[in-house]
Amino acid sequence: MWYLNMNAVMAIAGMALVLACTRWWPANKRVLLLAFNLCFLLLFSKKLFAFYLAYTALNYLAFLLLCHTERFRKGWFIGLIFLNVAGVSTLRLFGMDVFTHPLFDAVILLGLIYNVLKVIDALYFAYFFGKDARASVLDYFNYILFIPTFTSGPILKFRDFMADTKQPHRIDAAQTEQSIKRILVGMFKKIVLVTWMTDVFNHFTQGQGELYTHESLFLMVWFYALIFFDFSGYSDIAVGFGRLMGYNIPENFKKPFLSPTLTQYWRNWHATLGDWFRDHIFIFFSRQTPTKWTAACLSVLIMVLIGLWHGFSWLYALWGVYHGILLALENMLGRTTVNKRKVSRMYFYGRCLLTQLFVTAAVIVYGGSEETVIKIYKGLVHWPFS
């Protein structure tokens, strides 16, 4: 969201320059970055600033509690995660107008579904490492409020962010050039490609009555490309700015179109989200190597949770069930991976194409209103000569 506002972009770029000019000060990445994060949120929205100040402070206290308490650790751990999930879910229901209250402002939902995942990751770290997981209030606030990844990820791991925080700000000319090129590519995707592709998509979905089969197929493929450029563009910008600030932001897209199975696809598309759910759900429900049945059931659970994470609707729930069943079948049949070196080129690329067909069949769920999604699916059976 920040990256469509030129004032915000200039502010983030300015902060990267300030950090580069103050490399002589060992604490510049910590003190100056926190000041920037807080000032940025304050200028963007006073309500957003107040909410995140309280939200982060409360969760830091919860983090310290898990670091130091010995009694009822598991109970505290589960309870704190439940409170975070329940709180964020309730706020999302306010955003959907299921609940209403005059004090609620939709701006506080900005980035919340990403930041709650970071909060939970820190709680996991505190639970499993105890006193060794301690972090200063300054570093914890920077982790939650890190502006380049605040609204849409990539999702930062607590351990990795803290490791980067301890390193001095070092970035050479080659890294700077690479990061700036990454930002420019992301801007081109977001501002040029996505804007044009969105206009085309809206023209077809809003400018006429019923759709025909070929139009629905075109829109499904077109929308798939649209969300790839949209989200990968944002990730490119976030990675570029994050690295200019001295933090190694993880990749979100790792050649997902060359994934021969859905299991591999979800390690390459929105990789940090898939990694987060696999790491935390598998750790919680399966402390040992899971059997095929356990892995299959957990695949369904994880994909349903990812669907509901995107939105509380029956369409997202069905999307999760659909992908979960396909992943479960891959686990049960032992077809979770394909080694490119051990199969023919035709077989490998054929499997990649099959994976993309499975993804394309459901990707339109992200396409906006339920009416639009249903209209496109209905068009699949509306033959032009029937």
Image: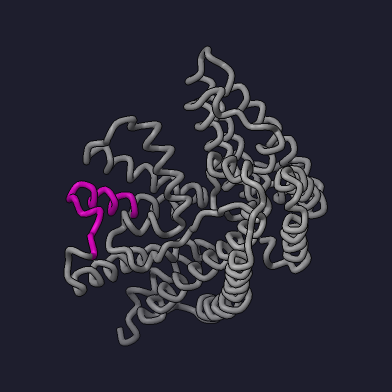
Q: Quadrant of the N terminus?
A: bottom right
Q: Relative to 8, say whether 26 is above or below.
A: above
Q: Position of residue 111 (x, y in %)?
A: 63, 50
Which residue is at a point 60% across and 63% down the rendered structure image?
240
Q: Is residue 385 left or right of residue 73?
A: left
Which residue is at a point 75% across and 61% down the rendered structure image?
17
Is residue 150 one of those drawn in magenta? no
Viewer-closest of 379 and 136? 136
Q: Position of residue 315 (x, y in %)?
A: 44, 55
Q: Position of residue 359 (x, y in %)?
A: 36, 63
Specify whether residue 33 is in view. Answer: yes
Q: What residue span does the magenta drawing correspond to?
A: 323-340
Specify whether residue 190 is in view. Answer: no
Which residue is at a point 67% across and 38% down the rendered structure image?
139
Question: Toward which corner of the image does residue 165 lie, by quadrant?
Answer: top right
Q: What secondary structure prevails in the magenta region?
A: helix
Q: Relative to 365, say whether 25 is above or below.
A: above
Viewer-closest of 344 and 371? 344
Q: Position of residue 266 (x, y in %)?
A: 38, 55
Instruction: State the residue lying farthest toward the bottom.
Output: 385
Which residue is at a point 39% across and 51% down the rendered structure image?
320
Callout count: 0
Q: Relative to 55, say whether 169 is above or below.
A: below
Q: Is residue 285 left or right of residue 39?
A: left
Q: Quadrant of the C terminus?
A: bottom left
Q: Is residue 352 left or right of residue 28?
A: left
Q: Relative to 209, say whether 302 is above or below.
A: above
